[in-house]
Amino acid sequence: MKEPLAYMRKAQGSWEKRILKSLNSMCTELNIPLAQKRPASEQKELLNKWNEMGTDEPDLSLFRPVYAPKDFLEVLMNLRNPNYENGEQPSFRNHLGLIQVPLKVKDIPELKEDFSELGLNIGQLGIDDSAQVPPEFFENEHVRVGQKVLAEQDSAAAQQYVRQGCPTALRAELWALILNISNQPEDILYYEQLKSNVIQHNLLVDSLIYKDVKLTASNDDYYFVFEDYLYQVLLCFSRDTSVLEHFAYSSATPPKSYIRGKLGVEEYAVFYPPNGVIPFHGFSMYVAPLCFLYHEPSKLYQMFREMYVRFFFRLHSISSHPSGIVSLCLLFETLLQTHLPQLFYHLREIGAQPLRISFKWMVRAFSGYLATDQLLLLWDRILGYNSLEILAVLAAAVFAFRAVNLMEVTSLAAAEAVLADLSTLKVVPLLQIFLFATVT
Amino acid sequence: MGGDAGGGPGPLQEIVFRNFYTAFVSVRVQRARGPRRWLTCVRRRRLMASPHAEQGAQDYFSLPRHQMLCDVDQVTAVRFILRQPSPVWLHFTIEELQIFPPSQKSPPKDFPSWLSQLAPPQQPPGPHAELPDPEKVSAEAQQMWVLTEVIRARQAAARIGRFDVDGCYDVNLLSYT
């Protein structure tokens, strides 16, 4: 079902309309069509430099991202249920955080049950494979089990297995097994067809993608080497009509347009972009970590597409789903408020609502904020538990870890500075301590 | 909060409605024969997992006959009792209420009923197997053909992967409707 709550559907519709207006006005200002066929010479040129599109330096100064995560946060902050007592007077009904909708979120006892494989007495990659621990304790056996799971090609067992982390050598195959990606000849053919669609038609969205990659992944120490791959994946992604199928269970609706100026004539109705997804600032960071695992463009493409239609789409659409960004934000705020009430109160008093800092982490599933090996360990758990709730738990755990420093800051800027650099954090110990070793 | 629905006596197959922030619903019925008191057929069915939270608040629900506590033939009146213990909601009710007697099943079937009738079980061929009766074969072949036509008609448009219209994808502005 798309979205049972009427007011959320309405909010998503208004948000989409804002995005459409923004894109339309960019179009009219720059006098560039949203889509047009490339002349033959341009097609040939693009085909020749397909593998090195990163060397292109088009003038992107006039383009701006359609929206950034903080714009989206403003929308979520203003989300209200008209049937809820949203009184101005502070009362037990009002939440102390930024999110004011009464969604059901889990508490730590429920999370402990759900994420039981992260328990203190269970071996984890990310902890029990560190240099100080002899590999006979856990690591060797875990790798052996992983190899067996791959040999049996057992998808359900793989999903259970990755809850304790994937060995680096097996991760690519295990993730593909869980997501059922096999890279058959017809999949390669499909990717080649998408590539030819990119060659034939030029989309305004392409410039947005270029700009996003140049602004984010190209500036990242870990991901800049994959710049060319990112174009090869994201440009094709925009042309992939099979992505439209995910709108059956997403609260979002793909943007529509009419060709040849035939407004309102259904025979000339098309979706724009063909996959219905308008990228925002930071979108390319969903793809970047996968480049460490997959080097064949067709397989990389399929893995990203599957990750998007299963998980990432929930991070930038308004819905009441437990893995939707609204629930994740509320889960984060509730966890922090319940278990670190002093910290929460302090940050609120100095005008540094914690969600303002952690929102961008969750929207990007922590890509670009954690070290890559740590990020992959986190995404192991997303796949293993088939849920994005771990993102909210990690966000709260990060605040808990830096609580002492945060208690001493006196402004939002200072709080941001304390939490600016997450690259030294070890994800699995943080999650374990927060869930299983904190006195509640 | 409650509501009554009345009419001539009749049997009940299913009650379908859309929730709007009701936490628990009870249904009582009055029967044509027997004592004139209200019998509970659905007792405190939980609609919302937590009365304070959104889960289940605007979902569709179905109460089929086999989940009811009492016999619901010959029902003359139905009473719905809605409970919402949480003070945070401004209103609560149920909407799009539909009560189905046994003749109608929801959702209605799409294809004619004769198609769904199974052919009578064939006798296993004896030791002196004969050629099958040509009339029977042609009748079954016809049934198969009609079935494939129905399936083909209902199949969603094939995934060709094309996003253009006749090779043209010149888009100027997005539509707001």
Image (tube, rainbow, N blue to C red):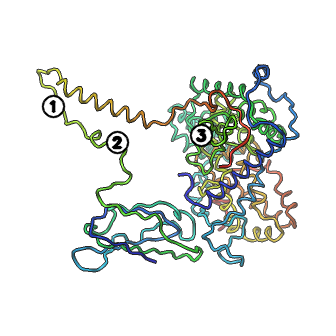
**Which residue is denoted by mark 3 in the rendering?**
A266
Q: Which residue occupies the extreme left position in the image?
A: B128
Q: Amino acid at mark 2?
A: Phe
Q: Earlier in the sequence, mark 2 or mark 1?
A: 2
Q: Amino acid at mark 3?
A: Glu
**Subunit of mark 3?**
A
Between circles 3 and 1, the one closer to the viewer is 3
Along the line of sight, the residue nearer the viewer: A346 or A165 = A346
Rounded to the nearest angstrom, the CA distance separating label 2 from label 3 is 29 Å
Q: Name the element at disc 3.
A: helix
**Which residue is denoted by mark 1 in the rendering?**
B123
Marks 3 and 1 close (CB-CB < 8 Å): no
Query: Count the marks: how many?
Result: 3
Determine which of the numbered discs, if any, sits on residue B111 in the image: 2
Residue A369 location, x and y as percent?
78, 48
Q: Residue at x 55, y 43 (%)?
A: A159
